[in-house]
Image (cartoon, rainbow, N blue to C red):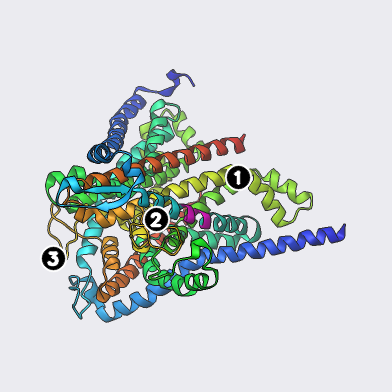
Amino acid sequence: MLSGYRARKLKSYFMTSLMALTSLLGVLPLFSVFYTALLEGGKTLVEAGLNFFTDLPPTPLSTKLGGIVPALVGSVVSSSFAVVVAGPIAFFIAFLVTEFPNSLLSKVSEVLVRSFSGIPSIIISMFVYSVVVMSMGTQSLLAGSLSLSIVALPYAYVYFASALRSVPESLREAALSLGMSKFRVLRHVYMGVSRRYLVTGVLMSYIRVFGDTAPLLFTMGFLMNSVFAGILRPSNALPLLIFVYALSPYEVFHRVAWGAVLVLIIFYLILFTLARGLLRGVRL
Amino acid sequence: MNRKKLFASSSDKIVFYSILPLVVGVLSLFILIGFSIFSQAWVSFERFGTNLLVLSVWKPSEDPEAELYGLATPLIGSLYSSLLAIAVAVPVSISLTYLVGEVLPSSIGDLLRVLIEIMGGLPTVVYGLWGSLVLAPFLRDSVMTPLHRYLGFIQIFSCYPLTGYSVLTAGVVLATASTPYVTSLLIEGYQMIPAKYREGAYSLGATKYEVFKVLLGLLKPYVVAASLLGFSRALGETTIVTLTIGNSMRLPLCLFEPTMTIPSLIASQFESARLYTYAMPTLFAGGFLILLVSLGVSYLGIKKLYKWREEIRA
């Protein structure tokens, strides 16, 4: 009996160690990614200096590293555009679904918005290409931004829906029992109580679209020779630049890609920490 | 709930109906996406028919009559690399769930969860660059070459790894990027299991591992659902695969061979496809197929997920 228990205990230890090892293998890539990005990207940033944020990208055979400014500008503009367009739509649909959970419309909306996250983002890129780019005759910052807006929609929805659900039922009922309409409850109770959650949702959606490459492949263009050409002209984006440079055979492009990856990771970590910090402050 | 209860006041009704056009707009957008991809693809479906599914050839030509395309390789490559990714990611995710759920003290467990969250939100292009410049050469020198040397008589290890870009590399990087997603789903489900099961198992004197085995039994449909969702994501993933799979139009009988997926075919051929009559429609045809499979699989996954949640709460 005792020996049977011992054998089981031993087996438990063995399996626990095995799974701990498997888990370690699972998170190891993250450290490898951070390590190489810091090492390779660091070299690039040190050599290029602050000009990395203000110069145009290098030519394939150039000895100087240049910078990534067109991609930075394009990324910031298109991601902001996407969050501004998709955010309110996602918010009102999330409001509809949480406040009128029994209506058919809510059920349809829930399934619909969730289905959007099942669309591969390269398909969205092809869609925007065939609808916007082909009719405008050129790839553009606008097309890229629209593409990102569609990608942002389901993400923003998930964050906003969970933000609205985070409001305690007691507060909702108290407000409704005072005879407030749902719209006033939204304005005075939801906006107040779940404010931080909402901001977190906006930040997280922003991070998502800021790092997405595939939606921009056929829509954004690849601007190299000027910082900004206008909203109806081709632009560039940080992930797009990394992707194209990683595919190229040139050494100098790989080095710029590493620098850009480091910038992207740092930016991502800052926004991520900000978003989490906001949530930590919430005590209900 | 009867219908009269839906609106408490007329102002609620106004709110409800002012959101209606928004939903209609989003619904039309969804239909428009499917329709426009299909209508662009139609020419190719009409011209090549079932050959599109069985042939494996990419032959553009100035003369439209001589053009010939078949998507068998990218279709199989898509399934192959995504299955590989899930086969790697699911055991890792289950292990992580065990550690967070049963083994680690909550402070370290929370730290691990933050780490997983960071990993999950990291842009895929970061994994792509890392996969192509760091992992591919590493796998070639330290994994593929030895496996080929000593186990080369097995079919899947039979080819000599040349560049490191291969279906194996793509599968591993895809697995890395899918693991956080699958893990957070699993942990979420694991914590929904009512405490009575865990308490019951421990009170019977079960070891940690045995408790986990019991709970994992309950979680099984949820694991399947999470795998389906992870698979659907991996299927549509473009950036990582294009950078690591080598993009070559050949059937991957061996794990170390480069091949391609539908998204990587689209990403790598889109620019030149504009020059030919049937190339672009064929890319859209591939896109339409992947859209259908992806939506179908993720629908199944979400349905299974919700069903399990309802059952475990009951």
- Residue at screen point 74% across, 48% down: B201
Q: Which residues are magenta?
A: B83-88
In reply to whether residue B285 is colored magenta, the answer given is no
Disc 3 is placed on an element classified as loop
Find disc 3 in the rendering and name its residue.
Answer: A226
**On the rendered structure, is B312 left or right of A89?**
right
Against A60, residue A125 (above or below) is above
Q: Are marks 2 and 1 on the same chain?
A: yes
Question: In this view of the protein, which residue sits in the foreground, B290 or B124?
Answer: B290
Q: How packed is label 1: few (under 14 Cα within 10 Å), some, or many (20 or more)?
A: few
Question: In this view of the protein, which residue sits in the foreground, A198 or B112?
Answer: B112
Find disc 2 in the rendering and name its residue.
Answer: B251
Mark on residue A74? none
- Looking at the image, do the residues carrying marks 3 and 1 touch, with CB atoms under 8 Å apart? no
Question: In this view of the protein, which residue sits in the foreground, A88 or B138?
Answer: B138
Find disc 1 in the rendering and name its residue.
Answer: B220
Residue type, label 3: Ser
Residue B210: percent from the left, percent from the top?
72, 53
Question: Residue A269 sits in which quadrant?
Answer: bottom left
- What's the magenta bit mostly, secondary-structure-wise? helix
Q: Is residue A270 visible?
A: no
Q: Is residue A195 visible?
A: yes
Disc 2 is placed on an element classified as loop
Q: Chain of mark 1?
A: B
Instruction: Please tell me whether mark 2 or mark 1 is closer to you in this view.
Output: 2
Q: Chain of mark 3?
A: A
